[in-house]
Amino acid sequence: MHTDIVDLREFYHSPLGRLADHSISMALASLWARLPDERLVGLGYAVPYLDRFRADTERTFAFMPAGQGAVNWPPGEPSSTALVFDEELPLPDASVDRVLMVHSLEFAENPRETMKELWRVLAPGGRLVIVVPNRRGVWARMEHTPFGSGRPYSRGQLTALLRETNFTPGASAEALFFPPSKLRGVLKLRGVFERLGRFLWPMFSGVIVVEAQKRLYQGLPVAARASRRVFVPVIAPQGVPTTRERASR
C-alpha cells in the first residue's frame, strides 16, 4: 500500500526529511549532473528532487500514483502533475528521455509490469534512476519515515529486475548512512555518519540509487490488455442522496 501524499509532504518538511532530501540529492548529483533540453518524468513522490533538475530540462512532469494521491507542482505555476497508474502511463511510446523513481518501485503492485511500462515510454538510449529502500539498512525497518513502508530491495534483486525488463544497470550510489532518529543530537552528527558510512558500511545504507539504460537489441513480448481500473470522481461521500433522489422524496 502506498504512503499517503499528506504523510510524504509532512516528512519532507520535517528536519529529518530535509536531511534525507540532502543526502539523496547528493547521491543523485553523482549520477546525473545536468539534463540539458531533455524530457524528465518523476514517478512516485519525486518532487523534492525534481527542482534540482528542472531548470535544465526541456520539460519536467511529476507523475504520482493514484494510490498515493497528488499535489500541485510546481507551486505557484501551471501544474505539471498527473495522477496515474504506474502500469499505464499517459504517454506515447519513446516520448521521454529520463525517468526518476522515488517512493515508487517499493509500492508497485507488479514491479515487472511497471518496469516494462517505463521501457515503453523511454526514448532509445533513455535513462532511468531508481531510489529504493535498502533491505539491509535500518531505514527500511523504521516505520516513522516513508522508507520504512513498501517492499525494500537488495542491490542484487534490483539488478535482476532491471535485466529481466530490458534495462542495462550502470552507475550506482548509496545514501542515508545516518540513523533515522528525530533527536537533535543525532541529527547534528549526520555529516559524520554520512562520511564514515560510505567507507565503513556502504552495504547498510538507507537507500540504494541505481541508474539504468534502456536496452534496444532485445524485444519484450507485448500483450494487449484492457485497463483493470478507472478513475471515479467523488463529488460527495458515498451514501449521500442526489438532488433527484431528494426531490422524489
Image (cartoon, helix red, strand yellow):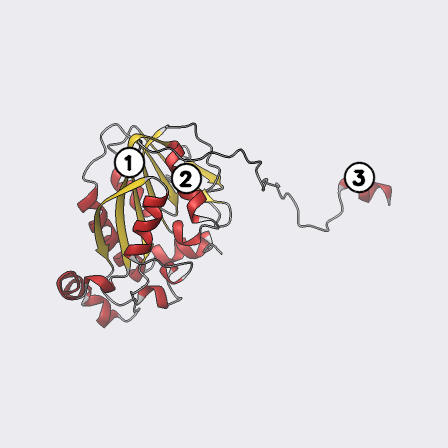
Q: Residues within 10 Å of mark 2 (few under 14, many from 20)?
A: some
Which residue shows up at 28% across the image and 29% down it?
38
Q: Residues within 10 Å of mark 3 (few under 14, many from 20)?
A: few
Residue 91 x/y as whole percent? 44, 30
Say if residue 47 shows up in the picture.
Answer: no
Q: Nearer the viewer, residue 67 or 200?
A: 200
Residue with the mark numbered 2: 116
Closer to the camera: disc 2 or disc 1? 2
Whether tag 3 and tag 1 are in contact, CB under 8 A, the answer is no
Element type where label 3 sits in the image: helix
Quarter of the rendering occupied by the C terminus: top right
Which numbered circle lies on residue 54?
A: 1
Whether tag 2 and tag 3 are in contact, CB under 8 A, the answer is no
Please state if 179 lies on the left or on the right of 42 as rendered: left
Q: Nearer the viewer, residue 109 or 82?
A: 109
Whether 9 is drawn above or below 87: the answer is: below
Residue 171 x/y as whole percent? 20, 46
Q: Quadrant of residue 73?
A: top left
- Kind of residue indicated by mark 3: Arg
Q: Quadrant of residue 35?
A: top left
* 3 or 1: tag closer to the N-terminus: 1
Residue 110 x/y as whole percent? 47, 49
Which numbered circle lies on residue 244?
A: 3
Element type where label 1 sits in the image: helix
Closer to the camera: disc 2 or disc 3? 2
Which residue shows up at 77% across the image and 40% down it?
243
Disc 2 from disc 3: Cα separation: 46 Å
Residue 186 x/y as whole percent? 23, 70
* 2 or 1: tag closer to the N-terminus: 1
Disc 2 from disc 1: Cα separation: 25 Å
Whether 123 is drawn above or below 33: the answer is: above
